Image (spheres, rainbow, N blue to C red):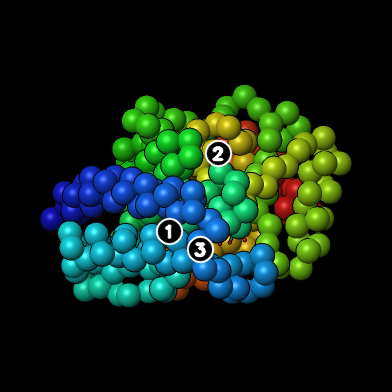
């Protein structure tokens, strides 16, 4: 029996859940001074009480609507379900910009089945931009179809770069140096999910991160694929949930981006 109706039901429900989560996160964005902050990997990798509150809301809404589904969230990890579907959640992607009062953050919700993200939403409440994708049905921004850029190359377009302290700094600086030396330019906004959404709608020509988590990129992978872009292989099984390198982009820059990353 086709899984289409089950995917469709979850895709429809997730649209409401991601917006409600985004409204809550945006309220907390206005109350930063009241948040509690816990250090994770280091001082650049933290979780706020808003991250945990938003994830709890999403988990509650998923449990109410699809009690048999699993959820993998950045803050509470994997709660496996009995069904074929696992929701992959980053309640606030871009926690560092969020905590420092900058608008480059979002709520990211992916829906995985059979080890692949088959639908996803990335909601940017500050810009009120809702990116959505469902496998085989394309990608949209606020309901209008989107596609990766087809005109720019690495020397004329902007390339997103993910950076954190989970890899040696040379993994980031060497790539940035090669990109600059080739005539290109990078941007890092602190939210991998949001930069993947910007690739899907053609604002960025590509994205590279030496080590990104599944909850950061699950929804964005579905968005980029459905918007006509390519992605490097990434373990999307929520049960594995490993961090790893990721490249995505528009077709015309695939070889050049691989060459830059290879060094
Ligand atoms: C962030 C990612 C970003 C990565 C940061 C951080 P968070 O997610 O979106 O790509 O470079 O280190 O992990 O922690 O803000 O949800």
The one nearer the camera, 202 or 73, is 73
What's the mark number on residue 199?
2
Looking at the image, which residue is at 66% across and 72% down? 42
Mark on residue 248?
none
| Residue at the image position 79 percent from the left and 49 percent from the top | 176
Circle 3 Cα neighbour tier, 10 Å, few/some/many (<14 / 14–19 / ≥20): some
Q: Quadrant of the N terminus?
A: bottom left
Disc ID at residue 35? 3
Measure how far apart labels 1 and 2 are at the Cα level: 21 Å
Q: CA distance from mark 3 to mark 2?
A: 31 Å
Q: Residue 205 is drawn in which quadrant?
A: top right
Q: Nearer the viewer, mark 3 or mark 1?
A: 3
Q: Position of residue 262 (x, y in %)?
A: 74, 55
The quadrant where ligand 1 appears is bottom right
Camera-nearest residue between 159 and 257: 159
Distance between the alpha carbons at the discs numbered 3 and 1: 15 Å
Disc 1 target residue:
91
């Amino acid at each position: 029996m086709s899984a289409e109706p089950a995917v469709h039901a979850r895709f429809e429900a997730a649209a409401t859940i991601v917006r409600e989560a985004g409204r809550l996160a945006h309220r907390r964005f206005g109350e930063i001074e009241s948040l509690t902050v816990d250090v994770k990997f280091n001082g650049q990798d933290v979780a706020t009480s808003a991250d945990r509150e938003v994830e709890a809301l999403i988990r509650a809404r998923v449990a109410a609507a699809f009690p048999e589904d699993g959820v993998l969230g950045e803050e509470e990890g994997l709660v496996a379900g009995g069904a074929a579907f696992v929701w992959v959640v980053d309640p606030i992607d871009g926690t560092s910009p969020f905590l420092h009062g900058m608008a480059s953050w979002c709520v990211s919700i992916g829906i995985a089945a059979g080890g692949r993200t088959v639908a996803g939403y990335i909601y940017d409440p500050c810009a009120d931009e809702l990116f959505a994708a469902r496998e085989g049905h394309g990608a949209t921004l606020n309901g209008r179809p989107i596609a990766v850029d087809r005109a720019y190359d690495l020397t004329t377009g902007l390339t997103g770069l993910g950076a954190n302290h989970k890899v040696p700094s040379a993994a980031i600086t060497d790539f940035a140096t090669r990109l600059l030396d080739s005539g290109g330019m990078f941007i890092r906004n602190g939210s991998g999910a949001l930069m993947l959404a910007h690739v899907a709608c053609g604002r960025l020509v590509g994205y590279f991160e030496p080590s990104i988590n599944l909850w950061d990129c699950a929804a964005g992978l579905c968005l980029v694929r459905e918007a006509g872009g390519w992605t490097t292989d990434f373990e999307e099984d929520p049960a594995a949930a490993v961090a790893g390198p990721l490249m995505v982009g528009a077709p015309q820059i695939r070889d050049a981006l691989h060459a830059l990353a290879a060094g």
